[in-house]
Amino acid sequence: MTAHPTNSLERVRTVLAGGIPDRVPVDLHNFMMVAQTSGMPFPEFFQNGEAMAEGQIQAWREFGHDVLLLENGTAALAEACGAAVEYMEGSAPVCHGPAIRSLDDIDQLVVPDPHKVHPLVENLKATRIVANEIGDKAFIIGRADQGPFSLAAMLLGMEEFLLRLAQADGARSGRRSNGGDPELAKKLHRLLEFALEVTTRYAYAQIEAGAHMTSIGESLSGPDVCSPKSYRTFEWAYAKRMVQNLKAHNIDLAYHICGDATAIVPDMVETGAAVLELDYKIDMPVVKAATRGRTIVLGPVDPSGVMALGTPHDVEEAAQEAIVRLGEGGGLILGPGCALPPKTPPENVHALIEAAKMYGMYQ
């Protein structure tokens, strides 16, 4: 049955409940766009909760999108745990130094209090301001930053983490298999347990700040970087546990892996995540078959090649294709599959919104 929402919040909630809204809702992953528009230096903007909130609210007033995805990049939790982070000019902050030197140093790590540690306090402030201002009109996703796998990689250092992962991969039931190292695997799982606790605690804080949903990014665990086998051994169970922990408190989780995640989408569905944030590289018919009636797809418009570098006509065509392939019977939130570049043309964003209205109607 087709629903008739009165605003964006109801529209998105209809989709999440498995219903058919009046039209496909639209998400904007636009935190770098709002930094660019603000005119502030990026390092200052991404450490200022008031500025981040005001930028998001102004963008919502201009574009009228249904979902606001709030974050300041991919390194907030890593910084809060002691990793070195560089605030870049013209881009998002990046992690460039680990918090620990080796897996033997895990006991040195301390779970941060997101209400007291920088930059989490600023991110939560942004969520709180946006929720207070427009949380009764639009759907707010307060990003819980990186999931356990990606956070663990930053805490140890990505190269070191991936090297140790390759050495440990294949360990099964406390014995060596395919050259794997079970003792090393145990250490990696200890780090992942720590990262799970950190990410889950921050997820709760985002909901307490007023977000309607939270989300994690785990692109490092996807097929563009790791094998599906590594994903299933060192990522899947942690994502599933996080989903279950949050669901026990009536909190939904969106789960992001960019690149061509097609091979692991059935596994992602099995985590129970309410939303899968997926990239333009996916095989859309295969993904639709795997997700139909089980979860919601958010995406998968190309943020760079189409949204940033294409024309409004290119955006319209990409949006129409996504709606046709993924929107039948509901289950789609249209948007870029990853973060929009800072200089994405506003006219292309307007084209995305208009395409949803033109091609995404269910009545």
Image (tube, grey):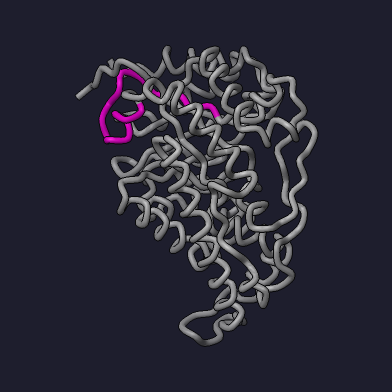
Q: Quadrant of the N terminus?
A: top left
Give yes or no for residue 26 being in the magenta stretch.
Answer: yes
Q: Residue at x 71, y 23 (%)?
A: 36
Relative image position of residue 302 (x, y in whole percent): 59, 31
- Please identify the residue farthest to the right as the structure is shown: 89
Q: Which region of the structure is painted magenta?
A: 12-28
Residue nearest the viewer, comparing 119 with 159: 119
Tell me how many marks there are. 0
Q: Residue at x 55, y 76 (%)?
A: 170
- Please identify the residue farthest to the left as the structure is shown: 1
Relative image position of residue 265 (x, y in whole percent): 45, 50
| Residue 280, image quadrant | top right
| Residue 304, image quadrant | top right
Relative image position of residue 320 (x, y in whole percent): 47, 21
Q: Quadrant of the C terminus?
A: top left
Residue nearest the viewer, comparing 199 with 256: 199
| Residue 123, image quadrant | top right
Q: Residue at x 61, y 22 (%)?
A: 55
Relative image position of residue 287 (x, y in whole percent): 42, 42
Q: Is residue 19 above or below residue 178?
A: above
